[in-house]
Amino acid sequence: MKPNHSILLFFLLLGISCQSQPEKREQNEIKKTTMTETQREGLDSIILGAGCFWCVEAVYQQIDGVEQVISGYSGGYIKNPPYREVCEGTTGHAEVCKIIFDPKKVSLETLLSVFWQTHNPTTINQQGNDIGTQYRSAIFYFDENQKAIAEKYKKELSESGAFANPIVTEVTAYTNFYAAEDYHQDYYNQNGSQPYCQFVIAPKLEKFEKVFGDKLRKK
């Protein structure tokens, strides 16, 4: 009997997750930062968790007005957590991206609109095959204004019925941020041929570009 290639591809995709990809050997010394340094004048930042940070990074790198995207870990209780421990779900951290942006070019509201439309905010501790507390939907705000905007947007979305199930995104005050290991930064651009990039990130980017075409950075 000839194999059904559609079924084979289906089961292949079932096994693809952020954690299942080949992990490069960690450096002896990994530079991390709490990112409390003052940002360049005129720029703002927000920390967002929407599943695997490789996906989040790839999306926000495309937006005009976003100056830098840094993959990292937030919301946990362990200092300088290594990737392996975060993946085990024992540090309390979520995989996140710190989005540094120019509010004169792109608003926080736009960034949050992208956030809620590029992941499923109704699944607890899960995005697709990525399962665990480290993949929770989360917004870590820096001030009361960001908190008010995030909570208002979340409330309006919940009441609109845009999602069949309740939104479980946590809106939490910033407490810490640790930049992820170097090999996690700019991951999609550096590893586009990896299965996770091909089957998970690329389709998400394609959908994102169709919806937010007017927000994209000029190439």
Image: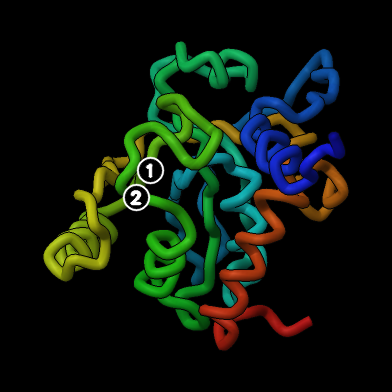
* Residue that numbered label 1 is attached to: 137
Left or right: 24 as drawn, with respect to 156? right
* Residue that numbered label 2 is attached to: 121
Mark sitting on residue 181:
none
Q: Can I make out residue 90 in this image?
A: yes
Q: Looking at this view, is 202 or 179 the one in front? A: 202
Callout 1–callout 2 Cβ contact below 8 Å: yes
Q: Mark 2, residues whose alpha carbon is within 10 Å: few (<14), some, or many (≥20)?
A: many
Residue 24, given in percent of the width and then of the height, sits at: 84, 25
Q: Looking at this view, is 2 or 112 the one in front? A: 2
Q: Quadrant of residue 132?
A: top left
Residue at 87% across, 48% down: 193
Q: Quadrant of residue 136?
A: top left
Quarter of the figure that contains the C terminus: bottom right
Left or right: 94 as drawn, with respect to 138? right
Residue 126 position (above or below residue 50): above
Residue at 59% across, 79% down: 210
Q: Secondary structure at mark 1?
A: strand
Residue 100 position (above or below residue 195): below
